[in-house]
């Protein structure tokens, strides 16, 4: 069936699903690290604090280059950047499986992080290009599910980790984005003029993007969310294994269920926004609820929390967290300094996301190693408090919600 015929029969949804699929494949590269952490620690003789950088090093480039890559998306074209992102992730994972030591492995994670950033900054621009205004809100909510869906699927692949070993698991995750890059290049059809490189002054775009206040706030919100989320979920397979005295495969399966709840939060957030619930209200409720859950998960409120209750609270934590990316992706085109700078605004958000991906696991690993896991709840409280300050500082969107 031709792409044109599919578009006539199903509207923009095949293209939207193809873009979301690219995000899911990219999320595999995030989820594989916490799954394989114990195996990598044993093979390369790493401490918990050092192994936590397997998560954080992935985001180093994103923490530095989110906005520049967003500007590149606006000027070079979103589809080109998405394909390059998938290729970089595939090459990085291939080299990572061959890494002889910890330093080499961390370097390949940085390369994967660059590819991941290229893809996730370009993808919302692609979604906006193919989705009519009437369905754009739901399309963005669907895009926001890419991370929990990808992490859930990769956690469900735990038997392949046991069978292949962590190096073989890395090579499997190299083949997937390389193949998907070809699929995206062949299968994605954009409206005329949608992926033609811009001929505007890049100097003016840089100035307008960096002077505007609201994109910085969106980046800060994503930073606090990502740090709080991965402070817990970056180590969830390890925690679950200890709570229930189960092996790697069972721990990964239980973690997958908890991560999947975030996708439910993404969809719920989209539906609530469409029904007129304020994004500011959703952000306040989500961050506040995550902070309260963390106090019980880590047992700081009065003794150790029973494992089953702690696990259920992890699911609630994930569900509440899923509301936040949906609101931020919905806000990006509405808070962009100009319509031509949506990519740069998404870049601010993704740069904040990657800063949080560095800060959250690294700080949580160091705090847990020094003071124990209950102290990690104080880190989550600090992240939630900072986010609430930014929510109150964020003015109402200049462009009202549509679709």
Image (spheres, rainbow, N blue to C red):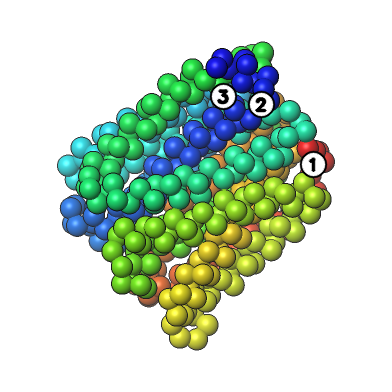
Q: Residue furthest bottom?
A: 302
- Determine whether the residue tagged by mark 1 lies in a helix, strand or loop: loop
Please name the residue that numbered disc 3 is placed on: 78
Label ID, residue 401: 1
- The CA distance from mark 3 to mark 1 is 23 Å
Q: Quick one: label 3 or label 1, which is nearer the N terminus?
A: 3
281 versus 210 height, above or below: below
Q: Position of residue 204 (x, y in %)?
A: 67, 24
Image x and y of residue 291, in percent: 58, 69
Residue 348 visible in the current orientation:
no
Label 2 sits on residue: 10
What SS does tag 3 mark? helix
Q: In the depicted view, which residue is nearer to us: 312 or 192?
A: 312
Left or right for 351, reference 393: left
Quarter occupied by residue 188: top right
Mark closer to the observer (1, 2): 2
Residue appearing at x 49%, y 76% in the figure: 309
**Looking at the image, which residue is at 59% across and 59% down?**
319
Asked whether the beta carbons under mark 3 and mark 2 sit within 8 Å of each other, the answer is no
- Residue depicted at 27% across the width and 36% down the height: 171
Residue contact between numbered discs 1 and 2, judged by CB atoms under 8 Å? no
């Amino acid at each position: 069936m031709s792409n044109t015929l599919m578009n006539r029969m199903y509207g923009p949804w095949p293209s939207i699903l193809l873009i979301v699929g690219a995000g899911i494949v990219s999320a595999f590269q995030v989820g594989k690290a916490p799954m394989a952490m114990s195996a990598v620690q044993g093979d390369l003789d790493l401490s918990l604090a050092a192994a936590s950088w397997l998560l954080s090093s992935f985001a180093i480039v994103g923490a530095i280059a989110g906005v520049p890559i967003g500007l590149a998306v606006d000027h070079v074209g979103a589809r080109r950047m998405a394909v390059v992102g998938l290729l970089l992730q595939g090459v990085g994972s291939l080299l990572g499986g061959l890494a002889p030591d910890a330093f080499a492995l961390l370097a390949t994670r940085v390369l994967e992080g660059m590819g991941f950033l290229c893809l996730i900054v370009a993808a919302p621009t692609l979604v906006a290009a193919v989705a009519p205004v009437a369905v754009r809100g739901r399309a963005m909510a669907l895009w926001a599910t890419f991370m929990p869906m990808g992490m859930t699927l990769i956690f469900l692949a735990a038997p392949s980790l046991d069978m292949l070993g962590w190096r073989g698991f890395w090579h499997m995750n190299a083949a997937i984005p390389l193949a998907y890059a070809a699929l995206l290049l062949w299968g994605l059809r954009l409206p005329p003029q949608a992926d033609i490189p811009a001929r505007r002054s890049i100097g003016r775009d840089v100035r307008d993007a960096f002077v505007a206040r609201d994109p910085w706030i969106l980046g800060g919100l994503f930073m606090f969310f990502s740090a709080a989320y991965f402070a817990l979920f970056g180590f969830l397979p390890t925690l679950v294994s200890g709570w229930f005295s189960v092996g790697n495969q069972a721990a990964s399966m239980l973690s997958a269920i908890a991560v999947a709840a975030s996708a439910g939060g993404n969809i719920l957030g989209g539906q609530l926004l469409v029904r007129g619930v304020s994004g500011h209200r959703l952000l306040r409720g989500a961050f506040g609820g995550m902070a309260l859950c963390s106090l019980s998960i880590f047992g700081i409120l009065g003794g150790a929390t029973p494992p089953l209750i702690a696990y259920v609270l992890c699911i609630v934590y994930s569900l509440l967290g899923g509301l936040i990316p949906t609101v931020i992706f919905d806000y990006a085109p509405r808070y962009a300094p100009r319509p031509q700078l949506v990519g740069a605004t998404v870049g601010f958000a993704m740069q904040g996301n990657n800063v949080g991906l560095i800060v959250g696991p690294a700080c949580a690993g160091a705090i847990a190693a020094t003071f124990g896991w209950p102290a990690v709840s104080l880190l989550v409280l600090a992240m939630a408090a900072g986010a609430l300050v930014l929510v109150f500082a964020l003015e109402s969107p200049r462009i009202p919600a549509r679709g």
